Image (cartoon, helix red, strand yellow):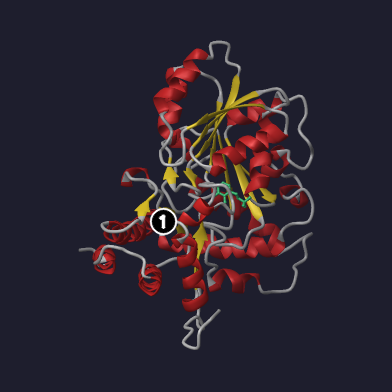
Amino acid sequence: MPKLSNLSQGRGYLAIPGPSVMPEAVLNAMHRPAPNIYAGEIVDMMPPLMEDLRRIAGTQHHVAMYIGNGHAAWEASLSNVVAPGDKVLVPATGRFGHGWGDAATGIGADVEVMDFGLQSTMDIDQIADRLEADTNHEIKAVLAVHVDTSTSVVNDIAGLRAALDAADHPALLMVDCIASFACDRFEMDNWGADVMVTACQKGLMVPPGVSFVFFNDRAAAVRDAMPRVSRFWDWTPRANPEEFYQYHCGTAPTHHIYGLRAALDMIHDEGLEAVWQRHETLARAVWAACDAWGAEGDLSLNIADPALRSHAVTALRLKAPQATELRDWVEGNIGLTLGIGLGMAPKGSPESHGFFRLGHMGHVNGQMIMGMLGGIEAGMSALGIKRGSGALEAAAKVIGGA
Ligand SMILES: *Cc1c(COP(=O)(O)O)cnc(C)c1O
């Protein structure tokens, strides 16, 4: 229970890996009466919105927008190119890889999971061997998660493309960028992704509710050869609408369109390279603090190699139940909400209380990160959690550019 000295009044920081912090500009843009959906502003807003999304994705090709969350984008993408009985390969590096694979099972695919565990990236060589062995080209698609939000690992998508090319394998390379979009560098066309899915509530800083599927001409050809694609998921009319309603297969997500416009303007004003750079610097500050804390006691970064860590989210390990105690303390006492550990141990098990995550995606700046780290320091101090010293100084040096 909150104590008399509770310090949680004031602006909170929801430091979970999605939904992320919503900018005032986004919320203000959404606070308006419903527009006419048959003519006028909302109709004119869509083409430039799609263009700006393509620019962030690094693709010249197509994008379809869906009313729905990330799971909807998973299902949308699969529904267009994977028929019942088709084989898909899922190199999993955490909960979300398994989740997308499960979505494929749900639409009747024959799913083969290559599980790379919870603390490492994909082993591209092993995947290459599997592709080489598939001489009949039964694998129709490879479902790869760029940043698995549960483990905070970042996977080498260009490397996966190279493996497919080296094996001369025609499988589509499908990539989940839901956590990484507008946070970690991603270049769809340059890296050779055929399909990419993302959603609006993480790096795009918009309340959950819309998601996107990007696809190239190769993927479009696979869709055209499908025995059937259900009307709602079909990406073709959404990406090439003759009528406005076709963008969304019905009523437009009017307020999300306004919010998204504001968010894309913010990203554009800052510059995409600068957005990626900001995320990298803030992530390095977080890691510097965690390294210092981890020098004594039980805290450790889930992904040991900094080159394999996402800039959007950091997964951490602590002695159970200290992670849960720490999350409870900072949320109850100082207005800071940290992410739960996800997929690291069975839900509710004693071990599950030894994992937590820090979301640092989207509308996040230097003082927020220093505040989050300071808050964690306060929590560990209050709870008597053993840790190394100098964490805040180490983070401050990164933030200060030293
Ligand atoms: C958040 C997330 C999802 C799921 O998105 P929902 O909107 O919760 O359905 C899928 N994949 C990744 C990598 C994510 O970070």
Q: Residue furthest top?
A: 135
Question: Could you say whether the residue bearing mark 1 is in a helix, strand or loop?
Answer: loop
Q: Can residue 22 be seen in this view?
A: yes
Q: Residue furthest bottom?
A: 4
Where residue 114 appears, as percent x and y from the top left, is 52, 28
Q: Is residue 327 above or below residue 174?
A: below
Q: Is residue 369 above or below residue 229?
A: below
Indicate the quadrant where residue 258 lies.
bottom right
Mark 1 within 8 Å of ligand 1, using the beta carbon: no
Compare residues 260 and 239 and report the one nearer the observer. Answer: 260
Compare residues 283 and 118 and report the one nearer the observer. Answer: 118
Q: Is residue 350 above or below residue 327?
A: above
Task: Specify the quadrant that holds the C terminus.
Answer: bottom left
Q: Is residue 44 above or below residue 12?
A: above
Where residue 72 appears, as percent x and y from the top left, is 68, 46
The residue located at (31%, 58%) in the rendering is 297
Where residue 169 appears, as percent x and y from the top left, is 51, 18
The residue located at (42%, 43%) in the rendering is 154
Indicate the quadrant where residue 171 lies.
top right
Q: Is residue 168 visible?
A: no
Where residue 180 appears, as percent x and y from the top left, is 48, 49
Compare residues 200 and 115 and report the one nearer the observer. Answer: 115
Q: Which amino acid does label 1 sit on?
A: Lys
Compare residues 132 and 194 and report the one nearer the observer. Answer: 132
Task: Specify the quadrant that holds the N terminus.
Answer: bottom right
Badge count: 1
Q: Is residue 257 left or right of residue 152?
A: right
How crowded is the residue under tag 1: few (<14 C-alpha within 10 Å), some, or many (20+)? some
The residue located at (39%, 75%) in the rendering is 382
Q: In this view, does 373 lie to the left or right of 361?
A: left
Q: Name the residue under label 1.
A: 319
